Image: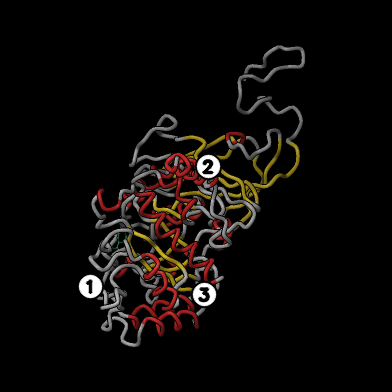
Amino acid sequence: MATSITSILVGLLYAIGTTALENGVGKLPALGFNTWNMYQCDYTADILLEQAKAMVDHGLVKAGYNTFMLDDCYSLKERDAKGRIVEDPKKFPKGMKHFTKSLSRLGLRAGIYSDAGYRTCGGFPGSYGHEAQDLETFADWGFSYLKYDNCYIPFDNVTQENVYGRYARMADAIAARAKKTKSQPFQLALCEWGWQQPWIWGGRLGQSWRIGGDIRPWWSALSSIINQASFIASETRFYARNDLDILEVGNTNQGTPPGNLTYDQAKSHFTAWALLKSPLLISSDMKTASKETLEILENHDILKINQDPNVGEAIAPFRWGLNPDYTWDPDHPAEYWTGNSSYGVVFMVLNTQDTPRQMSFNLTESWAIRAGRLYEVYDLWSHTNNGTAYRNISLTLPPHGVAALLLNDAGPEPEGLEPYCAGYWQCSFPNGTYYSN
Ligand code: GAL
């Protein structure tokens, strides 16, 4: 009897929890800085605060990058006598509270990192079995956002849980703490590397989930993430985001490991991440950031769509391009993408080849376009109006280059344009005769 009531309750929980948490936190993708790609474990509070200051000086905080994520390696290797995580006094000589207060003074909310196993991936204490206690420590230190990793998992006979269950332990601790203290819940970023289709269940527990393993600062790694994202692009919505991983923009010839992205590759990277509504966390040196890097990160037209308050969904592919549709190809992912936004219909066209290429599409290949209409075309990179288009658009793109366009209705097409149907073979005259394009 007890078992059947339990299973009914568990069943109900699963049934209720099919949508996003919507607990008031993290409606839009997080924007900010994360320490990992740039520093890994090699940082101090002073070094990080210099980055935060540079973000303010460059206008990035004003542009919306308002979260500062302290990733792995901030603590001592062992907990104290009371089981608490202790900040590393060499890295944080003035204490963690001083660090988060300094961030807050610069207009940044503070995020921290832990792990759903015994240890973090860097070998520092993980939160398995210490969920509520660690959350209290993080809150006391001044953090309100938690990235939660997946290393050093206890044996099955210990957890008697799968990935979902281990992450639910922290999600439950967050909900319980919010209720008890009548405060805003922590924002939770799941990082189980896309192991168990987190895009299906991640929104029940947190606000974002990593869709794959660690990003690397070269094109093959980026195109592989774009390929993965192309199959789950429609799984992102308000309060629940596919996380394509920390940005590598700016890590050309620097970072850990040093990157080699060209300007066009960095632009494509940023465009895809932003329009797929991923969190956008910078992780390159903002003190020495080049004009190009800042121009990419501060593209207000693209950021505006990433942060659209009315449209939660992302762009998705409408045609794969080089490959037949729905082909899995980490080197040549989908090339033609579209979606809606508060500002117009969005198109992203990606040249996945190593040579310049002319690329074109019919406007009505996008579900968001009305047939028989003219459209004004705005270029989200040149920030210019490029005239009016009807039927199709043709572009020449550099190797691994991108075009990002915003189209707005400009009235009906001129009468009598042939073909009468831009796309489909089922068009017919009123008398039932098919019109063949
Ligand atoms: C990885 C994670 C990275 C970073 C690193 C820290 O598992 O995917 O983003 O957090 O651990 O050790």
In percent of the image, x 35 and y 57: which residue is there?
Answer: 262
In percent of the image, x 31 and y 68: which residue is there?
Answer: 72
**Ligand 1 is found in which quarter of the picture?**
bottom left
In percent of the image, x 50 and y 69: which residue is there?
Answer: 65
Residue 277: image location, x then y, percent: 51, 53
Residue 213 seen by the camera: yes
How would you rate the neighbour count of disc 2 (Cα within 10 Å): few for under 14, some for 14-19, many for 20 or more? few
Foreground pick, 351 / 310: 310
Q: Amino acid at mark 1?
A: Lys
**Which mark is first along the chain, 1 or 3?**
3
How would you rate the neighbour count of disc 3 (Cα within 10 Å): few for under 14, some for 14-19, many for 20 or more? some
- Residue, disc 1: 77
Q: CA distance from mark 3 to mark 2?
A: 44 Å
- Residue, disc 2: 15
Secondary structure of the residue carrying numbered label 1: loop
Q: Quadrant of the N terminus?
A: top left
Q: Amino acid at mark 3?
A: Gly
Q: CA distance from mark 1 to mark 2?
A: 40 Å
Q: Quadrant of the C terminus?
A: top right
